[in-house]
Amino acid sequence: MKGPSRMPPLEPQLPTPDLIGICSAIVPTLNEADRISPTLRGLTHQSYELREVIVIDSYSQDGTGDLVKAAGEKDPRFRLINDDPLPAGWVGRPWALHTGFLHSSEASEWILGIDADTQPHPGLVASLLKTAIADGYDLISLSPQFILKYPGELWLQPALLMTLVYRFGPTGTPSESAQRVMANGQCFLCRRSVLAQLGGYTAAKSSFCDDVTLARFAAAQGFKVGFLDGAKVLKVRMYEGMAETWREWGRSLDLKDAASVAQIWGDLWLLLAVQGLPIPILLSFWFLDIPISFSASPSLFLWGLNLFLLLMRIALCAAIVPSYDYSLAQAKWIFWLSPLADPLAFIRILISSIRKPTHWRGRSYK
């Protein structure tokens, strides 16, 4: 119901003279050599609104730093900095972003955090800045267009994405409260002055979903936060295959570090109702040969309700088609079978909700 009223996707834009040098980009890295090259190329293609690109590397062992240095030889805006050892109580990603913020130029009015798995289109930064300034946002992040390749991820990834849509609605719609704010750290723009008032990334230092934690903290302080559709300005190749998608992305989708216990279990109940149960209930009617009386009856209500939920889920598949790039996909039709993965998606969120990560982005945590 919110879909028709949401803001349209951002379009690439050309910068204007008032934007010269007002943004610094920070890229946290740890062994990203296999996927950082498209990110570096995409940032090189941004115009004069981007003052500098600070890559904060946690002493990668795979040649990530060499790729950044090579990019810096062609584009002097690139800087490579190794962060200090991880302090107690910090998670690696927010620590790297905080380090980058402290090393950024004070002449930059905006700070853009961007991940090493992103593929920025030309005009991304100008579009972000113009939208934020025109609409009065203090913090704005984007949902990307996801690049899918293998059958397993074509089946599972949309079901995991749908857990966010059901809980927080579509991108480009206002949140009901600070505790329902959504954000994506893959492309996360914030006013420098606001980030300074928030203490940099310290409010999210121990969070494994630091993007949502920081965005909700900012919203609670009265700042205007937006989560918009960036499918036309940003692509992301997050994980390779179904197993990695299950293990890595599923580990953070519960958002437990940014929510109260009551909110977490309320959201789990919602996901159980709309994703976890409809397929098993409908299959039970089939395999157990449960009769359906078309007069008013509990069995008719149960069958009709869950059939409606399944049809709604299929319709939402059609709604999220623009959020995917299938140009490299094998058997792209498997995407339409993703509702069958919904029960697994619910189980993954449940498992993540009751476990604290011990490994995250190449680091181990106690």
Image (tube, helix red, strand yellow):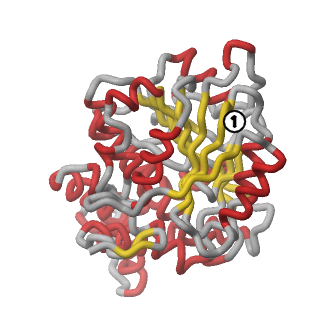
Q: Residues within 10 Å of mark 1 (few under 14, many from 20)?
A: many
For the C terminus, the quadrant is bottom left
User: Of 328 and 32, which appears nearest the observer?
Assistant: 32
Return the x and y of residue 138 as percentages of the image width and height.
44, 24
Q: Relative to the observer, which residue lies in front, 186 or 347?
A: 186
Amino acid at pointer 1: Leu
Using the image, determine if residue 160 lies above or below residue 7: below
- Which of the 4 quarters of the picture holds residue 290? bottom left
Residue at x 38%, y 72% (from the top left corner): 348
Residue at point 47%, 66% (across, down): 249
State the residue at coordinates (63%, 69%). Answer: 154
Classify 344 as above or below 260: below
In the picture shown, does residue 43 fall above or below 309?
above
Residue 102 relative to residue 57: left or right: left
Per the image, the residue denoted by label 1 is: 124
Q: Is residue 1 visible?
A: yes
Can residue 295 be seen from the camera position used here?
no
Nearer to me, 30 or 341:
30
User: Which of the two residues, 2 or 235, is positioned nearer the viewer here?
Assistant: 235
Image position, residue 130 (x, y; %): 63, 21
Q: Secondary structure at mark 1?
A: helix
Report the residue at 58% width, 69% height from top: 60
Where is residue 109? Give x, y as percent.
Answer: 53, 23
